[in-house]
Image: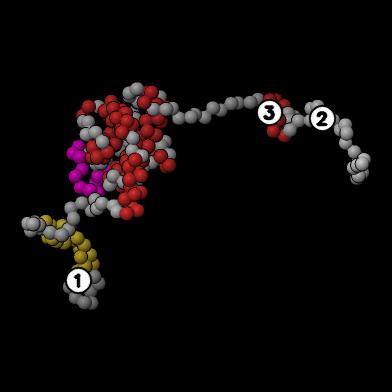
Amino acid sequence: MGTPTPRPSLIWLPWGNAASEPKALGLCWLSSPWLPTNMANKGPSYGMSREVQSKIEKKYDEELEERLVEWIIVQCGPDVGRPDRGRLGFQVWLKNGVILSKLVNSLYPDGSKPVKVPENPPSMVFKQMEQVAQFLKAAEDYGVTKTDMFQTVDLFEGKDLAAVQRTLMALGSLAVTKNDGHYRGDPNWFMKKAQEHKREFTESQLQEGKHVIGLQMGSNRGASQAGMTGYGRPRQIIS
């Protein structure tokens, strides 16, 4: 096993010229072979964690993946490329947040794009996660509910790619429902959201409604007191 090559890393260290001086934090370059290059990557899960992760992975829909990939390519253009098939390819394709940002921007008119897309895809971990977070904020502003939103780690660490699919499905459904001319692709790829249907009533109709007894309150039509005895009288039992 070869010796790891040291690489410089930025860390915060306290400094001060004398014991009486207050300590301050300063940036220092530290060269260490043991500092990780990707703090967001986790090791494999074991035991109960592995069992839970396995159940989450089973929720991932590969057929749905194909539909979402087709929509993103049609919506954003062929420049976004096409991922390798499968969970890993889907994750790597979307991981840096650039394609997701282009997707949500394509649903807005020119001049009001909600997310700034960098010319060069970010390579630093925190920049990629920040880009994904901007997409999530824009998707929520577009109308995706919090219950349909994935967390950044779901995509970045591959913890729950089924949640990523759920968010994209909700975004596509909203785009089809709004029908504002910005959606591209087959409308049958997504189900329309249920829309509010308001009805207006005149004042006279509202007043008439106050005198109507709803069936939920019961009905006395056909009611009869035949066979009933008066209050307080004992029931006659004939032996």
* Crowd around label 2: few <14 · some 14–19 · many ≥20 (10 Å): few
Mark 3 vs mark 2: which is more N-terminal? 3
Where is residue 78 drawn, in percent x and y? 22, 27
The structure's colour scheme is secondary structure
When asked about the image quadrant of residue 166, the answer is top left
- Alpha carbon of mark 1 to alpha carbon of mark 2: how far? 95 Å
Whether residue 179 is visible here, answered yes or no, is yes
* Crowd around label 1: few <14 · some 14–19 · many ≥20 (10 Å): few
Label 1 sits on residue: 16
Chain part drawn in magenta = 119-131
What secondary structure is marked by label 3?
Answer: helix
What secondary structure is marked by label 1?
Answer: loop
Where is residue 113 drawn, in percent x and y? 31, 34
Label 3 sits on residue: 206
- Alpha carbon of mark 3 to alpha carbon of mark 2: how far? 29 Å
Whether residue 106 is visible here, answered yes or no, is no
Label 3 or label 2, whichever lies nearer to me, is 2
- 136 lies above or below 109: below
Mark 1 vs mark 2: which is more N-terminal? 1
Q: Label 2 amino acid?
A: Ala
Label 2 sits on residue: 223
Q: Label 1 amino acid?
A: Gly
Give the residue at x 20% y 47%: 124
* Crowd around label 3: few <14 · some 14–19 · many ≥20 (10 Å): few
Give the farthest residue toward the front: 239
Give the residue at x 24% y 50%: 41
Picture quarter with the C terminus: top right
Relative horizontal placement of residue 40, taking residue 109 as reference (left or right): left
